[in-house]
Image (cartoon, rainbow, N blue to C red):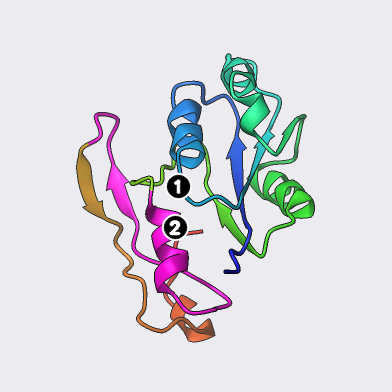
Amino acid sequence: MFQPKLSIITIVYNNMHHIERTMLSILYQTYPNIENIIIDGLSTDGTVDIIKKYESRISKFISEKDNGIYDAMNKGLALATGDYVLFMNSGDEIYTKDTIANVFASAEDADIYYGETEMINDNGQSLGQRRHKAPKQLNWRSFKYGMSVSH
């Protein structure tokens, strides 16, 4: 059975309090074909030390000065070799360990997979879903009033 490769790109800069939670939510996914890419903007607060604890389980890691989040995202895209790409920035989290496996198991071949985004506070409590609801069918008109799906 074909299992598409998913490149997960994590962008981080000086976020030692949240990077580990994000990394663990990726590392503990049950889906086996994940490329884990971390792009750090040359953090000085201990973020890099936390990342290096898991370096053997990270596919690609860069820590260097960048020109902002979009420059860092483009660096990650240039390194990605997956069939699909997911941006999972520091502080973001995949809620359950089977999320990616369930998406690929239940969905047909598609160009884009997307869903709702739930906001969680620092104590792990739900703040509800974000204001913009994901459309039932995504097309270019879906973005008329803003970003209708999370990256």
- Between 45 and 93, which is closer to the camera in this rendering? 93
Residue 99 part of the magenta segment: yes
Q: The N terminus appears in which quarter of the rendering?
A: bottom right
In the picture of the structure, the residue carrying the numbered disc 2 is 101
Report the span colored magenta: 98-124
Give x and y (percent) for residue 138. Answer: 46, 81
Give x and y (percent) for residue 142. Answer: 45, 80
Numbered disc 2: secondary structure: helix
In the picture of the structure, the residue carrying the numbered disc 1 is 30
Left or right side of 94 for 87 = right
Residue 86 part of the magenta segment: no
- In the picture, the disc for residue 84 is none
Q: Earlier in the sequence, mark 1 or mark 2?
A: 1
Q: Is residue 145 above or below residue 124?
A: below
Residue depicted at x 79% and y 53%: 78
Crowding at dot 2, Cα within 10 Å, few <14 / some 14-19 / many 20+, comes out as some
Give residue 61's quadrant in the image: top right
Labels 1 & 2 near each other (Cβ < 8 A) = yes
Residue depicted at x 21% and y 44%: 126
- Compute the Cα span from label 1 to label 2: 6 Å
Residue depicted at x 74% and y 56%: 81
